[in-house]
Image (tube, grey):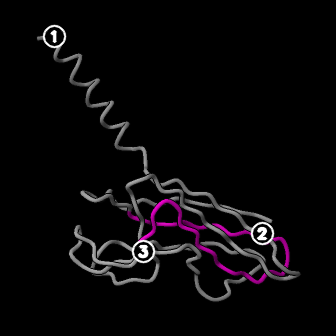
Amino acid sequence: MTRYFTVLPLLFLSLLSMAQKSPVSWSFTLDKTKAQKSEFKATAQINKGWNIYAVYMSDEGPIPTSFTFDQVQNGAIEGKIKEMSKSIKGFDELFEMEVVKFKEEAVFTQAFTNTGALRVKGSVTFMCCDSERCLPPATVQFDLKQ
């Protein structure tokens, strides 16, 4: 009986650690493109079999990817987030509706005008799903300086 009390907690901890590993990893850059122009770039590397959803789609289905720029020093946001990767639009069996999603890699950009050393601080919130289930939405923080 004592053996069960030892094995069960270890099994629970291993399942918990597997659940915390996201199938999506993010990288962020902030590059100067012209004298007073910069570009924020967010790249999602998505494990095979998983996908994330577009920024511009209905709120009735999966949670769209969204970016929040909490702090912009020495600059201003110019325009809207652009989806640079090829998206897949079609009927999704899981949500029983048309969705726009990305597989393998998703790249998003945001233009900024800058008046000095630009700093951009914020986060991306996204939901990832495979063909059978979705993980709860996750948020990843970024803090970039030029």
- Mark 2 or mark 1, earlier in chain: 1
- Mark 2 or mark 3, earlier in chain: 2
Who's the residue at 40% across and 62% down the image?
51
> What segment is highlighted magenta in the picture?
101-127
Q: Are marks 2 and 3 in contact (CB under 8 Å)?
A: no
Q: Secondary structure at mark 1?
A: helix
Given the image, on which type of amino acid does mark 1 rest?
Thr
Q: Which residue is mark 1?
A: 2
Residue density around tag 3, few if under 14, some if 14–19, many if 20 or more, within 10 Å? some
Q: CA distance from mark 2 to mark 3?
A: 28 Å
Residue 106 or residue 3, whichever sits in front = 106
- Mark 3 or mark 1, earlier in chain: 1
Picture quadrant where residue 126 is located: bottom left
Given the image, on which type of amino acid does mark 3 rest?
Ile
Residue 84 x/y as whole percent: 59, 76
Q: Which mark is residue 31?
A: 2
Who's the residue at 61% across and 66% down the image?
42
Residue 144 x/y as whole percent: 71, 63
Q: Which mark is residue 50?
A: none
Residue density around tag 2, few if under 14, some if 14–19, many if 20 or more, within 10 Å? some
Q: Secondary structure at mark 2?
A: strand
Given the image, on which type of amino acid does mark 2 rest?
Asp
Residue density around tag 1, few if under 14, some if 14–19, many if 20 or more, within 10 Å? few
Q: CA distance from mark 3 to mark 1?
A: 52 Å
Q: Closer to us: mark 2 or mark 1?
A: 2
**Prevailing SS of the magenta stretch:** strand
Q: Which residue is mark 3?
A: 88
Who's the residue at 80% across and 65% down the image?
146
| Quadrant of the rendering where the N terminus is positioned | top left
